[in-house]
Image (tube, rainbow, N blue to C red):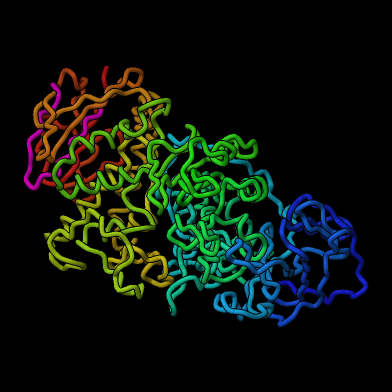
């Protein structure tokens, strides 16, 4: 970190102003503003070093001179970017009344744009009585305008032009076999070095697991929080993702990553956590919000001494309270305007649909205000439309600008490919954009974010390698993580040397990924699925900051054929210009213009019964003059499917684009021409998918 010069004890102060909130660098110094309606006194603490046992200067804010309404403010002359600071907030310590002021705790600024973390940081100290000056995180003064964005502008890909790659910033390059320079492994700059790989894969957006500063100590003893779903700040990038401990450099490295991804045509979507904080329940640490205005920021139980827990993390933010709502909106606008991100995926977004008492409400203000905020007008909004309190809103969350993680797509596709009963009708709905969820009322189609795997759960390799979770390493006696996986180990639990098992698993993986990329909606892939990344059967690796979670690039090399298959599927989805005199094949255009005609093994005779494990369909388009035929066989024996007559299949007949039962490179073709199919029927092998196409004259 840049050394901070000792402060001049005679530096002056001005009363300052209440707006903007947080630190604002100006010509004279820095203005600080903090909301606290019930504080009796606020102290601004300035530090020379992050591990200093005491502040170098303590400035008491006068209740008359430095307070306007609910806001405490002061301009400190001479304070420049890089200055470390925090607050002590005095007031009643009355948990039964909803107040948890503790004047011994040094608190982060809710609007601080950067956070410093020292070697002596201790979550335990924040939970215990006593002074935390030596063991707390500190806020850092920054000037967001000090970065050269060059000509960077939002990419504004439509959702129909989007394939999302969900990834962990550190896990993407942390492994020594990533080929990234050692000091850049696991960092924002490490991602930059791997942009050519993302381009080769063909994804158009990365969805980054939380990059807000979080508490790595919020885990069972001896483990480290890896995922980052426990924020301490809604503005600061996570310091550990920088190349060193300098908070200002970390901020610039994040922006360097965004700028580089944009130049490569890849959007940046942040997975954001505005539903809870790392302060946890009543036994958790006092880090920020709890010690500033507890009952304003958190939904409390009726007795006010305990926290409502609709998140499974100990507390729930009061998102529709005006102060908290403003904080969330300001944070979102900041990440768009100053950090240039393209969109957000909202963790447990159904918390937004709860009022200040935690009860579900219709047309929650914060959802509409995010939707209509002018700074977010071109921004992608994706909701995880459920919470841990039982509120499930898939198919009904927010206005049509909001897209949704489709958990039912995940479950139904998994169940069908596994071979479960009663799944063929559900498969039809998921393939066609989940019209049963999104085609009712005034909600348009195209709302679904389709995925079969994400960070939370099995990887695609483990989905076909384990019948049950193996989370013992999380030190919770395998109680954590879901049991509803719809997984199948293909005959052997865990790694197998059996060639038949290996081939079946490979085929099942291709089936799962093919259905994800062929279905209407926006597909999302999980980091490393294209290389069969494994977590050893752990389906809740939130606390595994190790090779268990990191991307093993040797697997990508070993499974290059699968990586090629995925990249070709992406190209098939988007289409490619083969020559100027050929019509462009694009599944995205198919979804806009086509209608589906359903078949079974015989034309026009789909089998919708519970014991059916196979279905086929043709997609007809007008202007594209194309037919696409897809046969899906989840049965454990081959099935012969009748094809539309050759006179309906154009002058060249049918051409095979995909057959997941075939070995590479025959499993998917590299061009539109395909392999000519001359027979009137096609034998679709057991547990496989076939895609044919033709050009109409």
Residue 85: x %, y % from top left:
74, 69
Name the residue at 59% across, 41% down: 154
Q: Which of 20/28 is in front?
A: 20
Residue 65: x %, y % from top left:
88, 59
Residue 298: x %, y % from top left:
57, 56
Q: Is residue 637 within the magenta segment? A: yes
Q: Is residue 247 within the magenta segment? A: no
- Residue 424 location, quadrant: top left
Please identify the quadrant where the C terminus is shown.
top left
Q: Is residue 471 visible?
A: yes
Q: Which of 198/247 is in front?
A: 247
Position of residue 277 in the picture relative to residue 689 (left or right):
right
The correct choice, above or below, for 149 with respect to 59 in the image is above
Please give the range of residues in magenta. 627-645
Position of residue 632 in the picture relative to residue 381 (left or right):
left
The correct choice, above or below, for 471 with respect to 443 in the image is below
Name the residue at 25% across, 25% down: 596
Residue 121: x %, y % from top left:
60, 77
Q: Is residue 253 visible?
A: no
Name the residue at 21% across, 24% down: 597
């Amino acid at each position: 970190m840049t050394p901070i010069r000792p402060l001049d004890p005679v530096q002056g102060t001005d009363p300052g102003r209440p707006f903007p909130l947080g630190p604002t660098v100006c010509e004279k110094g820095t203005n600080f503003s903090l909301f606290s309606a019930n504080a009796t006194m606020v102290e601004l603490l300035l530090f020379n070093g992050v591990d200093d046992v005491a502040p170098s200067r303590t400035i008491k804010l006068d209740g008359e001179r430095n307070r306007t309404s609910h806001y405490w403010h002061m301009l400190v002359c001479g304070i420049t970017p890089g200055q470390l600071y925090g607050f002590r907030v005095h007031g009643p310590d009355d948990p039964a009344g909803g107040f948890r002021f503790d004047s011994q705790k040094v608190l982060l600024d809710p609007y601080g744009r950067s956070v410093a973390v020292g070697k002596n940081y201790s979550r335990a100290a924040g939970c215990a009585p006593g002074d935390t000056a030596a063991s707390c995180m500190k806020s850092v003064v920054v000037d967001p305008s000090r970065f050269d964005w060059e000509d960077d502008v939002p990419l504004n890909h439509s959702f129909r032009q989007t394939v999302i790659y969900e990834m962990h910033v550190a896990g993407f390059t942390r492994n020594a076999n990533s080929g990234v320079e050692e000091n850049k492994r696991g960092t924002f700059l490490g991602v930059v070095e791997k942009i050519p790989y993302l381009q080769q894969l063909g994804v158009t957006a990365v969805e980054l697991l939380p990059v807000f500063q979080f508490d790595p100590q919020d885990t069972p003893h001896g483990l480290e929080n890896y995922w980052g779903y426990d924020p301490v700040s809604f503005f600061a990038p996570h310091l550990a993702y920088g190349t060193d401990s300098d908070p200002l450099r970390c901020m610039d490295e994040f922006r360097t990553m965004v700028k580089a991804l944009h130049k490569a045509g890849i959007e940046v979507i942040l997975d954001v956590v505005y539903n809870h904080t790392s302060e946890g329940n009543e036994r958790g640490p006092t880090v920020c919000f709890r010690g500033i205005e507890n009952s304003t920021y958190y939904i409390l139980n009726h007795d006010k001494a305990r926290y409502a827990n609709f998140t499974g993390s100990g507390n729930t933010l009061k998102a529709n309270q005006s102060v908290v709502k403003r904080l969330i909106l300001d944070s979102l606008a900041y990440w768009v305007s100053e950090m240039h991100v393209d969109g957000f995926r909202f963790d447990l977004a159904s918390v937004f649909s709860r009022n200040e008492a935690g009860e579900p409400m219709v047309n929650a203000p914060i959802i509409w205000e995010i939707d209509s905020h002018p700074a977010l007008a071109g921004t992608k909004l994706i909701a995880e439309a459920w919470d841990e309190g039982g509120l499930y809103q898939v198919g009904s969350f927010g206005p049509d600008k909001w897209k949704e993680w489709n958990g039912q797509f995940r479950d139904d596709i998994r169940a069908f490919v596994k071979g479960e009963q009663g799944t063929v009708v559900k498969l039809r709905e998921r393939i066609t954009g989940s019209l049963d969820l999104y085609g009712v009322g005034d909600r348009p189609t195209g709302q679904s974010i389709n995925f079969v795997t994400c960070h939370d759960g099995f990887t695609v390799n483990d989905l076909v390698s384990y019948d049950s979770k193996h989370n013992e390493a999380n030190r919770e006696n395998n109680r954590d993580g879901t049991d509803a996986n719809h997984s199948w180990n293909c005959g052997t639990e865990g790694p197998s040397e059996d060639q038949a098992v290996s081939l079946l698993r490979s085929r099942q993986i291709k089936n799962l990924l093919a259905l994800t990329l062929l279905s209407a909606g926006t597909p999302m892939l999980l980091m490393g699925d294209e290389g069969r990344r494994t977590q050893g059967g752990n389906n809740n690796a939130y606390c595994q900051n190790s090779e268990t979670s990191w991307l093993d690039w040797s697997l990508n090399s070993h499974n290059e054929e699968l990586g090629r298959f995925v990249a070709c599927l992406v190209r098939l989805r988007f289409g490619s210009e083969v020559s100027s005199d050929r019509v462009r094949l694009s599944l995205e255009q198919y979804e806009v213009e086509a209608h589906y005609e359903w078949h079974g093994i015989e034309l026009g005779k789909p089998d919708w019964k519970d014991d059916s494990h196979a279905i086929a369909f043709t997609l007809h388009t007008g202007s594209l003059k194309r037919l696409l035929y897809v046969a899906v066989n989840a049965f454990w024996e081959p099935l012969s499917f009748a094809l539309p007559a050759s006179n309906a299949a154009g002058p060249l007949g049918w051409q095979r684009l995909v057959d997941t039962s075939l070995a590479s490179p025959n499993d998917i073709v590299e061009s539109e021409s395909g392999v000519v199919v001359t027979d009137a029927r096609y034998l679709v092998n057991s547990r496989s998918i076939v895609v044919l196409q033709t050009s109409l004259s």
